[in-house]
Image (cartoon, rainbow, N blue to C red):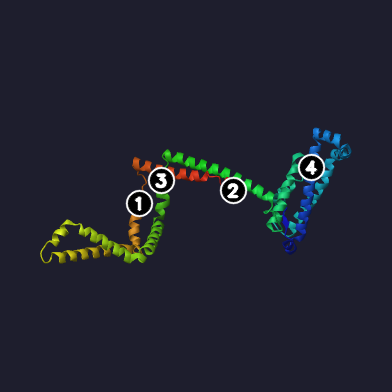
Amino acid sequence: MFTINRENLRKSHQLIWFVVDFLMLGLLIINLTWIILDGLYAIDAIRDLLLTHVTTMAEAYRPIHRNFFFYDLIFVGIFLTEFTVRWIYAVATKAYARWYFYPFLHWYDLLGCIPAGGYRFLRVLRVISIIYRLQKYNIIDITSTRLFQFLQFYYEAFLEELTDRIVIKVLSGAQEEINEGSPLFHKVQNEILLPRRDLVTNWLSDRVAQAAQTGYLPNRGALRHYLEGCVDEALAQNVELRRLRLVPVLGNQISQTLDDAVGDIVAHVIHQILDDLASSRNHDFIEDIVATFLQDTSGQRPAPEAQQQLIDVINEILEAVKHQVAVKRWRDAL
């Protein structure tokens, strides 16, 4: 059963209305239980069974069943009276912009007051509304009850099954449109990415600078040592340089000088490139790259091979998404 927060109930400025809610909730439960029992009594097989085994009680209930409509009107009168009092209070406190808004906003309370046939079971809506209002103001807590957790679990399982099927259906439809030659590629490039080319350039520029700063600057010395080692190894395998070493007197000196100069030049060029990438100076470079890839292709038709490869890539991505969507998380929880 749910717990009642008496502290919040005492502090509430609507204590009287919450007490009325509890009274109405009790009357609704009694009334709905009576409706169910009277409906069962109306079934011939059940009534005959009762008359056979509990004759006295069944006979005593017969006139009540015959006049059940009038007994139910007593509950209807109480419910309508409470509804009218709340309506008058809402008008007096100007809770709504117009005095006639209240019955439209609380239509579920009125429907349950129809004392005919299946309309009586609509009083369940009023039970739900009262419980929701008490939960909203932290007067009760039904989230910890087993019934709520049971209903919430299967409600979420139902929603997951429903939404998964809808998403898979939408993705399958997108795949069919792409395979049939949908202009999606041109729209993405010309209507989404191209107008935001400056934004893409700035974002890529910041990301490249950040990556260069965190990956290159702390390892600058190690990178230079690695580059010099690679240059030394490449020069040692160079045939012309080996021949230069055979020159008498100056051969080894010239070879060593070239070795040091080439290593220093390569390291300096690489360091300069990475320094530029790690600073704001990379913006023009990134802008040229983005401009090369993001060009207005309106009226142009891509090569069939390139277009088919792009379609295959998108289809594989959508298939991966569909497989992920199809995973039943509620089964794992169960």
Residue ID for mark 1: 293
Which residue extends farthest left? 248
Q: Residue at x 82, y 44 (%)?
A: 72
Q: Nearer the viewer, mark 4 or mark 1?
A: 4
Q: Quadrant of residue 221?
A: bottom left
Asked if labels 2 and 1 touch by Cβ distance under 8 angstroms, the answer is: no
Q: Nearer the viewer, mark 3 or mark 2?
A: 2
- Residue 110, given in percent of the width and then of the height, sits at 74, 47
- Residue 1, given in percent of the width and then of the height, sits at 73, 52
Residue ID for mark 3: 185
Mark 2 crowdedness (10 Å alpha carbons): few <14, some 14-19, many ≥20: few
Tell me which numbered mark, 1 or 2, is placed earlier along the sequence. 1
Tell me which numbered mark, 3 or 2, is placed earlier along the sequence. 3
Residue ID for mark 2: 333
Q: Nearer the viewer, mark 1 or mark 2?
A: 2
Give the camera-side residue of 327 and 62.
327
Residue ID for mark 4: 35
Asked if labels 1 and 3 touch by Cβ distance under 8 angstroms, the answer is: no
Say if 238 sits above or below 257 in the image.
above
